[in-house]
Image: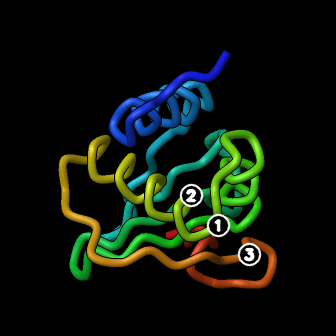
Amino acid sequence: MKYIITESQLDKFIFKYIDLKRFIQIKKNNKIYFVNSEGDEYAQIRYNEDSGWCYIEYDLIEEISSFFSLQIPDSKEVIGKWVENTLQMKVTNTMPARSTLSFPLRIPYK
């Protein structure tokens, strides 16, 4: 049996999946970091309030792609939509990043 799922229905499923991760939001200056726990050194997602840019940990993008059988660009886009929905702010661009190799996901101490 086959089911037809609309894009908006799929987005809702993915939003619920990401919600289950229970990210904690940490705001530093004009940036919002989504982390797994308060002591994390690196974020899974970082949103820049000034530019609307959203940096997403590549492993999270791959996880969504694999679990929902999506292409990498589609996963990146739907995570960006989730950030928009969660923060009620516009995401102008999404960029993949590796937390251990990329400074955008490192949370500043001050």
Instruction: Find numbered disc 2 in the image and state the secondary structure of the residue it sits on.
Output: helix
Q: Mark 3 or mark 2: name the one nearer the start of the chain.
A: 2
Q: Is there a contact, CB below 8 Å, between mark 1 and mark 2? A: yes
Question: Residue 78 versus residue 10: which sits nearer the camera?
Answer: 10
Q: Mark 1 or mark 3: name the one nearer the start of the chain.
A: 1
Seen at 56% across and 80% down, the residue is 104
Q: Amino acid at mark 2?
A: Ser
Q: Is there a contact, CB below 8 Å, between mark 3 and mark 2? A: no
Number of residues whose C-alpha sits closer than 10 Å to that of mark 1, classed few (under 14), some (14–19) or many (20 or more): some
Real-space Cα separation, disc 1 to disc 2, in angstroms: 5 Å
Q: Residue lying furthest front in this view?
A: 1
Give the mark toward the camera: 3 or 2.
Answer: 2
Q: In this orientation, does residue 109 appear?
A: no
Q: Position of residue 8 (x, y in %)?
A: 33, 37
Using residue 65 as the reference point, say whether residue 33 is left or right of it. Answer: left
Seen at 66% across and 48% down, the residue is 64
Q: In this orientation, does residue 1 appear?
A: yes
Q: Answer above or below: position of 7 versus 96.
A: above
Seen at 19% across and 47% down, the residue is 88
Seen at 45% across and 51% down, the residue is 26
- Name the disc covering residue 75, or none: 2
Instruction: Find numbered disc 1 in the image and state the secondary structure of the residue it sits on.
Output: helix
Q: Position of residue 110 (x, y in %)?
A: 49, 70
Instruction: Find numbered disc 3 in the image and state the secondary structure of the residue it sits on.
Output: loop
